[in-house]
Amino acid sequence: MKKTIVNDIDFSRYNIKNEVRYSYKTEKGLSKKIVEEISERKNEPKWMRDFRLKSLEIYESKPMPTWGVDLSELDINSIVAYLSPDTKMKNSWDEVPEDIRNTFEKLGIPEAEKKALSGVGAQYDSEVVYHSIKDNLAKQGVIFEDMDTALKKYPDIIKEHFMTKNVTPNDHKFAALHGAIWSGGTFVYVPENVKVEVPLQAYFRMNAPGTGQFEHTLIIADRGSEVRFIEGCSAPQYAVSNLHAGCVELFVKEGARLIYSTIENWSKNTYNLNTKRALVDKDGVIEWISGSFGSHKTMLYPCSVLRGKGAKSEYTGVTFAAKGQHLDTGSKMIHLAPYTSSKVLSKSISKDGGITNYRGLLKIGPNAEGAKASVQCEGLMIDEISRSDTMPIIEVLNDNVDIGHEAKVGRISDEQIFYLMTRGLSEDEARSMIVRGFVEPVAKSLPLEYAVELNRLIKLELEGTIG
Amino acid sequence: MIKSLDYNTIQELIKSSGSEEKELRVKGYEVFSKVPMPMWKRVKLNDVHIPYYKEYKSAIIKNEEQDGLVTNFITKALMDDDLNSLNTALKRNFGVDDKFKNMVLAFYNTGFSIRALPNSNIKLPIAVNYAVNGDDDTIIDLNLIIAERASNMTVMFDYSSEKRGFHNGLTVVIAKDGSNVNIVKIQRLSDDSSNFDNNIIITGNDASVRWTQVDLGSRVDAYDITAELEGTGSSAYLNSIFLGTKNQSHDMSYKVNHIAPRTESNVDVKGALKDTSKAVFRGNLDMKRGAKKAKGNESEVVLLLDKTVRSDAIPALWCSEDDVQANHSASAGQIDENKLYYMMSRGLSIDEAKLLMVEASFNPVIDTLPSDTMRESIRDYIGRRISG
């Protein structure tokens, strides 16, 4: 019996390698000196430097995680923590150095900005090289800045929110690592009742081999506001390991709504150990949309803390693991207040020995009266050498709840193919339709441009005969 | 004289025993003495007292004299065959924890070896009762159930007590080609007892094992049932009901490893939690590479009767074979208000209405128990626990 063939994602357009020109980079590895150097170079206030050093201490005191993906090959001491490209941040694409601009152009960033975005930030290795926001939004008081600038312009807000009450360096080893050597990233503030109709985007690009990217994203959606944020990530393929340990902190205030979409496309030498968390107040809504396609190994579990009455969270994710990839993803839903609700839909595809693992936590606290939660996980295995595992943890400390979890794993069934063929489709069309149908709930929740991107990522070439 | 669970006691136990028993106990003790007492995150073992070694003489077996059936007290003589079967089973990974599993191997004080001969059809259910009785309050049982080719049998275990007791057991079920085995385990030890149970099922070609677990008693309760579906076309159906009341903690683990092609499994757990009780359900459904056309299902439904309960579920699904069907689900919630309202409008009190709903959930499992008196006594017991 022939198997369905699903092609690897075509990474060629992400695989642009530029000559590494930098104005400054730190030594490999991690030390107090390096952390001080980064802080010095960025001309940071003392509290931030102290915070970095404190985080470094925490990092050193914590053991490597022993669960999830195998991290034994990740050598932090061979990673360059900070590498600043040979350019200053620009507000116009024309001023961005040509090779960097070309890279982003090939990735379609300026084009997308013209057509479909309210603002764009582009980070190249450790620093943001381009940033812009539409005037009308700026006039309404929307702040969209790169993190280093924000630290200078809005020190009070940053000091209050930066890794203090959302993600903290104490959470786990890689959060501490991030706290010590973070660089770049985005700060967004949406004032009360302002609705940002068109999405904001940040694009993160690692160009240099053997480096790490540690961008920090902080978004505050004030009462009754609405905003959509998209992040894209990619890097060319190198033989040495790259490390991405970003951190995303989201604050969704009363009645606000934040949609956070990620299309992650790191090259297959990247360790993607990312931390994302949203604190959601009364009647606030957080929606996570997550497409994980790249990286060598990923551990990523966006967390929603539903702490206000009636707060809501949705997580929609698709994970595609091909040869040599181990993608351990999932979501954490923590219900702390009454009438909170959450919904998880996770789809994973594994092929050519790729491993996908859904790892989730659903926790209903004692005060979460009337909470509702559902988790649905589906795995599609394309061949018999791959793996698809599901590992959800459900903790309920309240009786007045309605929760459900469902998961299934399987392959494209011959019955489905047969049925579609009786309806006049060729077998290839049938298979392709089933796979598209499988990821459709995710594709549907992306803006059009990104849905097209998703379809391109899952470029399916199907062949086969009836099994 | 008090006998601790130490090497002196082992020496004493094996003084007059055969080489098979010596081997088993000494090996078990080696691991037991090395492994620390586990620290569990979800069910705390603080209230568990590690017992002293004691004899246990209250085990009762019924219907043991039937054609085609060979039964033995495992403490009287451990046969060569038994040791071989045990060693086959002990190569696998199963049990609540190495500490408890090896405690049984080193210090077992009761247990039976039950063997159905090839092609035999054992009509009456074999009933094994382990009750806490006077000073006989420490039950460390090792049970070996072997269904030879194409045999049929039912074995029912009943663990009960009125006063504080300690139970830690290990049961091996080997269902050879074409056999059908039906196992029932009922656990209703008193509210201050501790219960640990380590179980493994190994199936041959086309063998089928049905396991019904009725888990009602003990303050701290942890059990594991592992099924190794090694024979092509073999199956395991694990049905369980549990009831948590007062401050009970139940930690229930089900592992099904689909190893051979066309194997089938279904884990179906139904439970209810009341007062400040706590339950952890761990389901591991593992479709190994090569288990083509295997089907596995795992589901847990918990009724939450009080605000103060805690229910955890980890229904994991592992899959490295594409040609399979595997599903799992878990749900938890309180009894539908409309249903309660309807029943109360018909004159039932809220407790009666709740009891009726729990019974409705449990009955499909209780109905499969092999004796009328057993069914009645379980229903009574559940009724008392929920209303009381």
Image: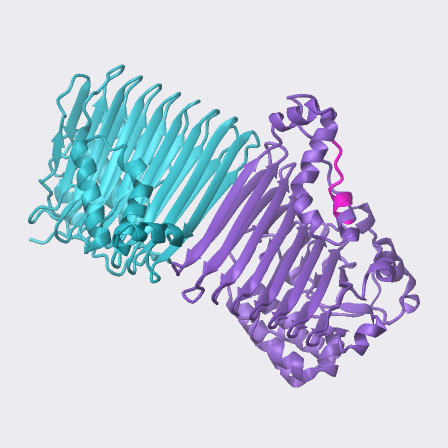
Instruction: Say whether residue B29 is magenta.
Output: no
A424 horizontally vs A69: left or right: right
Q: Which chain is cyan?
A: B
A171 horizontally vs A12: left or right: left
In this view, which residue lies farthest toward the top? B119
Residue A272 vertical placement versus B285 (above, below) = below
Residue B372 spot, x, y in % from top left:
18, 32
Residue B347 vertical placement versus B155 (above, below) = below
The residue lying toward the viewer, choosing from A224 and B93, is A224
Range drawn in magenta: A453-462
Q: Which residue is drawn at 19% across and 48% down?
A: B189
Q: Can residue B186 be seen in this view?
A: yes
Occupied quadrant, residue B247: bottom left
Occupied quadrant, residue B118: top left
Applied colour scheme: by chain
Instruction: Say whether residue A460 is magenta.
Output: yes
Residue A190 spot, x, y in % from top left:
71, 73
Q: Which chain is purple?
A: A
Q: Residue at x 86, y 59 (%)?
A: A115
Residue A320 spot, x, y in % from top left:
66, 44
* Quadrant location, the C terminus of chain B: bottom left
Q: Which residue is drawn at 59% across and 44% down?
A: A356
